Amino acid sequence: MSKIPFITKEKAEEIIQKYPTPFHIYDEKAIRENARKLKQAFSWNKGFKEFFAVKATPNPTILKILKEEGCGTDCSSYSELLMSKKCGFKNPEIMFSSNDTPFEEFKYANEIGAIINLDDITHIDMLKEACGIPETISCRFNPGGKFSISTTIMDNPGDAKYGMTKEQIKEAFLRLKELGAKNFGIHSFLASNTVSNEYYPTLAGILFKLAVELKNETGVDIKFINLSGGVGVPYTPDKEPNDILVIGEGVRKVFEEILVPAGMGDVSIYTELGRFMLAPYGHLVTTAIHEKHIYKEYIGVDACAVNLMRPAMYGAYHHITVLGKENEPCDHVYDITGSLCENNDKFAIDRKLPKIDIGDILVIHDTGAHGFAMGYNYNGKLKSAELLLREDGSVVEIRRPETVDDYFATLDNYWNVI
Ligand SMILES: *Cc1c(COP(=O)(O)O)cnc(C)c1O
């Protein structure tokens, strides 16, 4: 199996005339189709809503496309809240699922009508002082231990900094109720980038049982259960993608087994997907500018880890297509590198690819989420533009590239301190 880029060599060459590499480009049509499929998968649930995790792709145009498809946003910082507000998201379209939350951010989240999802029981007092306890409130759950699906360990919540224990969440609900909260939600995020149709149904089973227990023991009115993020995408070409329709049906099944008999059939299901909504629909497009032959074969490109940090940070695999050479044999082995003075600045290590010539255009796949967003400025490298491939085939810029003036902006008044 192979991954097929959503732009051809001819299209890339046309785009590069106007917008030089490196750049990120997103596929509007595919983003919309995927968002509609998610909505369809959960159409059995009357209150279903996806709150797109802004941190994955914090771009106003992307947020507005998702808004048109019925999504809200999930924020974790002041800037993300402000971006959501500027894009026109209103109460109750913003979820504030933060942790280690600054006092001022509770205040601002409440001011713009975001649903606050408390990460810890000790945050109740801070929230009360910051803005009072809102009528609608959510708490984040951490079951501890290891999280498995049948016999496979998926992740290790016991080691994660997020969420409250079961005892704490009970106590938190009782306190919040006493302080005037009326509508309650439960949130949990137990495993990241799961390529399994079982993740959401398994998580839903845990949260639905907890919801029944909490309702019985605290008497609170549970209005929504937030399955958060974690539904993944196949970064390697050999893996099968998740089937969101199967996932939606899987959640429906446990909903009908657990919540409906408990008289909780009107609970809304929320999601906070980031990666699943965007990753496959973004490419990082870069040009080969050097070849180097020492102990290994290297191709140097004009993008670097500043544009896509995941390979350097996690050793993450991102598939690479050399445009125009899709059908040529992968009979060369290369390390594909950026220019940072860091030996981990490699988009691929020992990757089998067709022969690459200087000037070849490379597509790095699945960079639509947690790609541009993780960018930084090491070595004084600047962040790239973001472009949108529209449904009619035209391309628009949705963020200009950084300039050296942007990079120096925080130094404007500091050239002559001493
Ligand atoms: C990062 C994050 C998400 C999105 O995660 P994905 O893996 O991109 O789906 C959702 N909710 C919270 C609280 C997060 O921190």
Image (cartoon, rainbow, N blue to C red):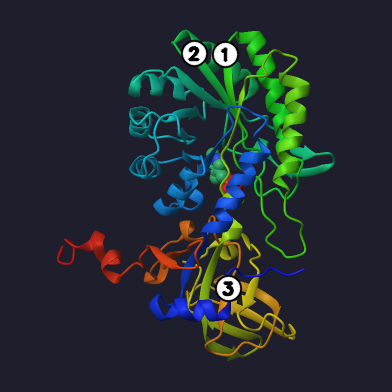
| Residue 249 locus on image (x, y percent) | 75, 36
- Describe the element under mark 2 as helix, strand or loop: loop
* Residue at point 60%, 52% (across, down): 33
Work out how far the residue at label 3 is from the one at label 1, CA to CA, in angstroms: 49 Å
Residue 35 in the image: above or below residue 329: above
| Corner quadrant of residue 405 | bottom left
| Residue 60 locus on image (x, y percent) | 40, 51
Residue 368 in the image: above or below residue 259: below
> Which image quarter is the N terminus in?
bottom right
- Describe the element under mark 3 as helix, strand or loop: strand
Work out how far the residue at label 2 is from the one at label 3, CA to CA, in angstroms: 50 Å
| Residue 311 locus on image (x, y percent) | 59, 65
Q: Mark 1 sits on what residue?
A: 221
Disc with the residue nearer the chain's start (2 vs 3):
2
Visible residue check, residue 114:
yes
Residue type for callout 1: Asp
Choose between 51 and 396: the one closer to the eye. 396
* Residue at point 60%, 16% (across, down): 170
Q: CB atoms at circles 2 and 1 under 8 Å apart?
A: yes
Q: Mark 3 sits on what residue?
A: 363
Name the quarter showing ligand 1.
top right
Residue type for callout 2: Lys
Disc with the residue nearer the chain's start (3 vs 1):
1
Q: Residue furthest front?
A: 392
Q: Is residue 370 left or right of residue 144?
A: left
Q: Mark 2 sits on what residue?
A: 182
Q: Is residue 110 left or right of residue 374?
A: left
Disc with the residue nearer the chain's start (2 vs 1):
2
| Corner quadrant of residue 361 | bottom right
Visible residue check, residue 145:
no
| Residue 196 locus on image (x, y percent) | 75, 47
| Corner quadrant of residue 279 | bottom right
